[in-house]
Image (spheres, rainbow, N blue to C red):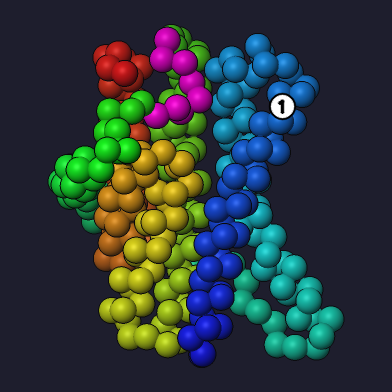
Amino acid sequence: MKGWRLFLIIVTMMIWVGSSIIASQLFIGYLMLGILGAEVFLQPLPTAIYSTLSYVVAMLLIIFIPPKIAEVSKKKKNKKSVASIDRKSLGLNDLPTWTDIGLAPAGFLVYLLLATGLTFVFQIFPWFNAGESQDIGFSLYLVGFDRMIAFLVLVVIAPIAEEMIFRGWLYDRMRREFLRKYSNTVSMILSILLVSILFGIVHMQWNVGVNVFAMSIVLCGLREITGTIYAGILMHMLKNGIAFYLLYVVGIA
């Protein structure tokens, strides 16, 4: 594969993933805002519905709809059918194992060390504010049912959706494309770096972006080690669960 064609494919994939996520958030957000109004929209339950629908639309745009369009296009042109999305390409083959469960906390510790190191390095830049709070969409003052639905979205739904998109579909596609031109090691390194950079960018906040870049490096590594995204999902849930506890139970903003 010629270098320029590979470059175009990779850039297109990254732009498609990033723009699909942003477009999904804007579409669902403005739709619900127009229907419910700002006061109702900002309540915990509508916020949870907004977040969930945004992830669903993003996954449809990124993972499920393009292969169907490509399949129809190939058939009309009487060309060989394209490979459909399957569980293995998403990293969901087989079932979670005890190894996945054990690697999740181990990976979390590696992520903490890497994130701490990168944050320390980035503090040399005057525009980097390590203490800037992240807007996660929910008020910090949640109790009862509102806290439960926030937990469901932030600790369960978000990790599953993000792992399927980034360490599932995108990582698998990048690995396949890079392997056409480069060795397995180079393909792995390029895929890990690009997926992690994009994962940081879509969070649209410097300190959060650096943090999740470090997390994505480890999550991609877990995908390589296990061949699935189960360990990554569990580690992502662990990270978000600890953050949720500190924000909504202990009250550390």
Does residue 51 sit above or below 146 in this rendering?
A: below
* Residue 244 as seen in the image, left or right of residue 142: left
Name the quadrant of the C terminus. Answer: top left
Q: Residue at x 25, y 43 (%)?
A: 125
Q: Can you see residue 48?
A: yes
Instruction: Look at mark 1 in the image and give the residue it sits on.
Output: 32
Q: What kind of residue is marked 1?
A: Met
Q: Can you see residue 86?
A: no
Estimate the x, y position of residue 180 in percent, counting from the top left: 45, 86
The magenta segment is 134-141
* Residue 12 as seen in the image, left or right of residue 162: right
* Residue 11 as seen in the image, left or right of residue 178: right
Instruction: Return the residue found at the far right.
Output: 76
Q: Quadrant of residue 128?
A: top left
Estimate the x, y position of residue 213 in percent, counting from the top left: 33, 50
53 or 152, which lies in front? 53
Estimate the x, y position of residue 96 in percent, counting from the top left: 35, 54
